[in-house]
Amino acid sequence: MANTCFFSFLNGLKRDVGWAMAPRGVHDWREFGKHHVGRPVPVSCCSQVGRPVSVSCSLVGRPVSVSCSQVGRPRLDNLTQDITMELSNTTSSSMWDYLFVDLADPRTNDWFLIKSPTPGLTIMASYLFFVLSWGPRYMKHRKPFELTNILILYNFLQVVFSVYIFCEGLDAGWLTKYSWTCEPVDVSTSPEALRIATGVYMYFLAKISELLDTVFFVLRKKERQITFLHLYHHTGMPMVSWGCTKYYPGGHGTLIGLINSFVHIIMYSYYMMSAMGPQFQKYLWWKKYITTLQMVVLLVVLVDTRAHCNTGQFCLAFLHSFQLLFHDCGYPRWTLFLTLPNAIFFYYLFNDFYYKEYEQRRTKDQKDRDDKDAKRS
């Protein structure tokens, strides 16, 4: 409404013949009316030369001031700049409110780090700056930090955090009332719905805390472990979980977080035992299976075991996220086009990592053994 008002005003200035017919020196709006040719005067008053006046219509409740020239005409260049600035501010403000207020879940929107994307993006930018630039330069001529006790405590807390999220997800939804086929977001303020929303928020905070993984790699000068896969995962998951907390805290998409938390229970248990020293490291032969498990998780994101065979066995039936195309339960289907490509890309990265880390090494070790046997013979 306000935009229409201003554009009408601007058009009126261009076509109003009476405005240009005002004799030089006429600055009083009542005198101006005598020379007007029947069209409404677009300015409320112009009492003296050069004084700013108020346009009769305003934008979002704020009058726009314009200056008058010697002959009582408004300075269109200043007016156009004012109107353009006001419209630009209003458009960006309205778009911001629409994206981050109107579309958001009111139950979670005021929670810490959720209301605006700015704090989260600041954290992510600082993280990337540290691990890619400042951190390596700081550590370049320094010895790596040991951090043994800190790592043990950190990994223990991550295990506890992951156990809590996993158990909450099972007890509050996936083992009790959630449908494995399609589950909408419960947007009510019931204790059950708020419990799920809180679990999603805890998962987001867990992803933020996991940024310390890379920080510790930098401080320990373990640059080899800071791969593209590692950075992509640690950068993408906080942003995705922030969006889930803000817009869809519950429902179908929480299965990914549930299974990911289970994997992290095993993964951080491994890291904790590894930090405890050689007496525990000899029991860590199962390291490579963590990567395999993560690949299985990505397949579970794709594959749902809801359908039963006649024998009672679970069988692979539908793609878990892909089911949204066939079951309309109210969960937004557009998330499918975000989830599936990322799952496929993650699977490719994990598979590539597994091949380079274990298969190539095994091939190289086998070749070395064959060379030694050949020399002996």
Image: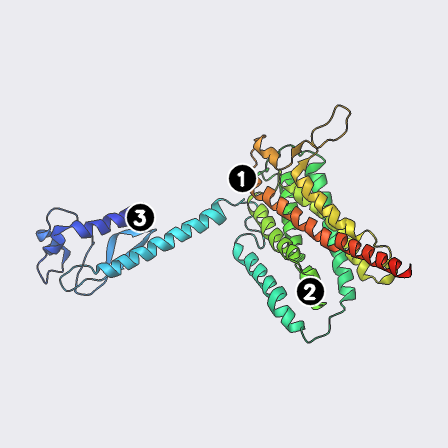
At which x and y percent is residue 147? 76, 67
Q: Viewer-nearest of labels 2 and 1?
A: 2
Residue bearing the label numbered 1: 334
> What is the distance, in whole Å, between disc 2 and disc 1 at their CAs?
37 Å
User: First in sequence: mark 2 or mark 1?
Assistant: 2
At which x and y percent is residue 315? 73, 31
Kindly identify the amino acid type of the residue bearing the numbered disc 2: Glu
Residue bearing the label numbered 3: 3
Classify mark 3: helix, strand or loop. helix
- Image quadrant containing the N terminus: top left
- Image quadrant containing the C terminus: bottom right
> What is the distance, in whole Å, between disc 1 and disc 3 at their CAs?
32 Å
- Within 10 Å of disc 2 (Cα), the crowding (few <14, some 14-19, many 20+) is some
Q: Which residue is more in the foreground, 256 or 72?
A: 256
Q: Is residue 376 visible?
A: yes
As drawn, 301 above or below 73:
above
> Based on the displayed image, in which of its 4 quarters is residue 183 positioned?
top right
Kindly identify the amino acid type of the residue bearing the numbered disc 1: Trp
Q: Viewer-nearest of labels 1 and 3?
A: 1
| 151 relative to 282 in the view: left or right | left
Q: Which residue is more in the foreground, 303 or 350?
A: 350
Q: Which residue is more in the foreground, 289 or 37?
A: 289
Point 24% across, 60% down: residue: 77
Residue at the extreme front: 377
Classify mark 2: helix, strand or loop. helix
Residue bearing the label numbered 2: 223
Residue 375 badge:
none
